[in-house]
Image (tube, helix red, strand yellow):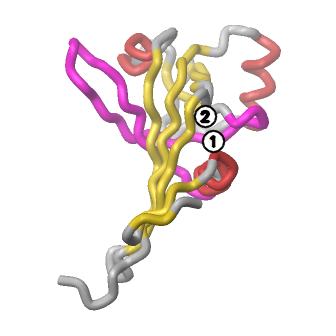
Amino acid sequence: MLHNEGFHALDRQECLRRLAKVPVGRVVYTRQALPAVLPVNFSLDADSSVLLRTSAGSGLVHAIDGVVVAFEADDFDAAARSGWSVVVTGRAAVVTDPAEHERLSRVGPRSWVVTRDDVFVRLESEMVTGREVTGAHGAA
């Protein structure tokens, strides 16, 4: 890890380890030519890709299928002024293979919203970066 005035860069493996511990992250994408951020629950697959489960007709699916997006998750302790943030950047794609969809139905993320036409979206973890901040005790 690199150290710089309270910030530490996290290596890829540490980033993925931390991602696996939190249930919610944010998809960053383009909607009507403007930046958009949407909180989603997710899980990591065995190949380190980020998996989302949502409705096939959702605006999110239409906006991100086949394009490069970012995904961010974090965990912070405001009282201790410490925490971490991880960003995964890569191409998003709806899972279309029936066998893969079936597998993910068993082991993938569970949607927090009931849907009848759910699909899985896989975000390839082409670039994974993260950093940790350690609090400055007594700082104003």
Q: Residues within 10 Å of mark 1 (few under 14, many from 20)?
A: many
Q: Is residue 81 above or below residue 123?
A: below
Q: Is residue 62 magenta?
A: no
> Badge 2, how many Cα within 10 Å: few under 14, some, many 20+?
many
Q: Nearer the viewer, residue 129 or 23?
A: 129
Is the residue under label 1 in contact with that under label 2 (CB below 8 Å)? Answer: yes
Percent across and percent down for residue 25 are 46, 45
- Position above or below: 85 against 128: below
Give how far across and how far down residue 71 sits, in percent: 46, 36
- Residue shown at 46% from the left, 12% from the top: 67
What amino acid is at disc 2?
Val
Q: Main secondary structure of the magenta part?
A: strand
Picture coordinates of residue 73, whole percent (x, y): 47, 49
Q: Earlier in the sequence, mark 2 or mark 1?
A: 1
Judge depth for marks 2 and 1 and give the one in front: 2
- The amino acid sitting under disc 1 is Ser
Which residue is tagged 1? 43
Residue under numbered circle 2: 50
Q: Kindly indicate the quadrant of the structure image that contains residue 44.
A: top right
Which image quarter holds the C terminus?
Answer: bottom left
Visible in this render: residue 63? yes
Tell me the element at label 1. Answer: strand
Part of the protein shown in magenta: 21-48
